[in-house]
Amino acid sequence: VASGEDPHARLALERLRQAGTTIRTFDPGRLDAELHGIFRLSLTAFAGNFLYTPISEEEFVMQYRAVLAYVRPELVLLAERDGLPVGFMFALPDVLEAQRGGAIDTVILKTVAVDPALGGMGLGGVLMDQVQRTAHGLGFRRAIHALIHETNLSRRVSDRTARTFRRYTLFSKRLMA
């Protein structure tokens, strides 16, 4: 996990602040509102991504509620402008490390999303940088940038601080009716 600040992120954060963007941690006390905002932003942010298929808000909330017991609010950041979500970074400890008999010292950077209207301003990099530095301060030693498609914009940000250690291949087969 990166302990130093990404200089790109530092400059981008200043630009974003001047443009009225604020960043805060996830508030479990406002769970429904937080998940609703993340869901709405996800629909917009991922609409053009490879293989993205929107799901219902009910299914989305159900999936996120299933992992809430493992969430550390300081590892989930929400960026807002004029009170509306414009970006988020969802990370959580790799709890499977404990099942393998080890200490939990890895954080999984599961999802980063930015409103396309803010694309190119560096918000994704800022969110990733802040979560990694927070994770380092909490004692995590590694960060996994999970399931990044080769053509996703987040790949450029990850490439600044991470290296590929595993690849996946998707297969398809046409089924006859």
Image: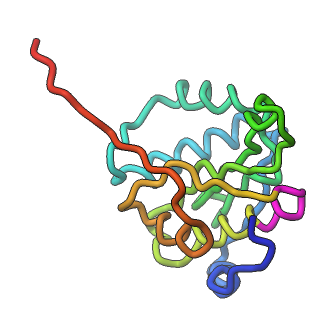
* Marker count (numbered): 0
- Name which quarter of the figure residue 52 lies in: top left
Decide whether residue 46 is among the magenta residues: no
Instruction: Tell me the residue at 83%/63% (across/down).
Output: 136
Image coords of residue 67 (percent x, y): 70, 31
Range drawn in magenta: 133-140
Q: Quick one: quadrant of the N terminus?
A: bottom right
Image coords of residue 57 (percent x, y): 52, 31
- Name which quarter of the figure residue 70 lies in: top right
Q: Quick one: quadrant of the C terminus?
A: top left
Q: Give the left or right position of residue 82, taking residue 107 as reference.
A: left
Q: Main secondary structure of the magenta part?
A: helix
In this view, the residue in front, 147 or 37, is 147
Q: Residue furthest left?
A: 176
Decide whether residue 136 is among the magenta residues: yes
Image coords of residue 78 (percent x, y): 69, 57
Q: Residue furthest right?
A: 138
Image coords of residue 154 (percent x, y): 49, 64
- Name which quarter of the figure residue 12 lies in: bottom right
Instruction: Tell me the residue at 66%/87% (across/down).
Output: 11
Q: Give the left or right position of residue 174, taking residue 124 as reference.
A: left
Instruction: Tell me the residue at 41%/44% (across/down).
Output: 168
Way the structure is coloured: rainbow
Q: Residue furthest top?
A: 177
